């Protein structure tokens, strides 16, 4: 099976899970704060840590690249890309690249928020 198809199927499942968590959080906690997004980011990062740790330290050779793609890039990618961001930051940190890890986190968050603001401003200007 094509790697792209495997990621596509996993991402669909992850997206459905994300939608379910968002709906559940809205019902339980209200919509005045982004509880759903925060919950998804935390759960996705925990799941990425568990899966990456399992694959790195416990899983045998039988775990194929397709399974890894389905679980991480697919399901967790559809659920939240924050888990991949967290894993990348942690890998830099664990490699001893502390400055790079801090810069990656700060630049990613700040520039992403600024890019979103720029996109909103551009659409407002053109509307």
Image (cartoon, rainbow, N blue to C red):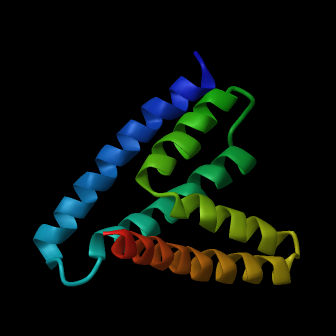
Above or below for 63 versus 125: above
Single out the residue that lies furthest toward the top.
1
Q: Residue at x 57, y 44 (%)?
A: 73
Locate residue 32, reporting x and y percent: 19, 84
- Front position in the image: 126 or 27: 126
Above or below for 104 versus 58: below
Above or below for 109 versus 2: below
Question: What is the number of callouts on the image?
Answer: 0
Single out the residue that lies furthest toward the right.
96
Q: Residue at x 59, y 31 (%)?
A: 67
Q: Residue at x 46, y 57 (%)?
A: 80
Tell me if I can see residue 63 in this picture: no
Single out the residue that lies furthest toward the left.
27
Q: Quadrant of residue 94?
A: bottom right
Q: Residue at x 60, y 19 (%)?
A: 2
Quadrant the N terminus occupies:
top right
In the rendered structure, the answer to whether residue 88 lies left or right of residue 93 reads: left
Locate residue 106, reporting x and y percent: 66, 83
Quadrant the C terminus occupies:
bottom left
Locate residue 28, reporting x and y percent: 13, 72
């Amino acid at each position: 099976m094509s790697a792209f198809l495997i990621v596509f199927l996993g991402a669909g499942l992850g997206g459905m899970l994300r939608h379910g968590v968002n709906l559940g959080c809205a019902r339980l906690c209200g919509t005045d704060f982004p509880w759903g997004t925060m919950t998804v980011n935390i759960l996705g990062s925990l799941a990425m840590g568990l899966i990456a740790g399992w694959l790195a330290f416990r899983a045998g050779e039988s775990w194929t690249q397709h399974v890894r793609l389905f679980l991480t890039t697919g399901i967790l990618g559809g659920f939240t890309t924050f888990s991949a961001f967290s894993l990348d930051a942690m890998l830099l940190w664990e490699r001893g690249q502390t400055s790079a890890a801090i810069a990656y986190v700060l630049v990613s968050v700040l520039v992403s928020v600024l890019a979103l603001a720029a996109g909103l401003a551009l659409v407002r200007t053109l509307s």
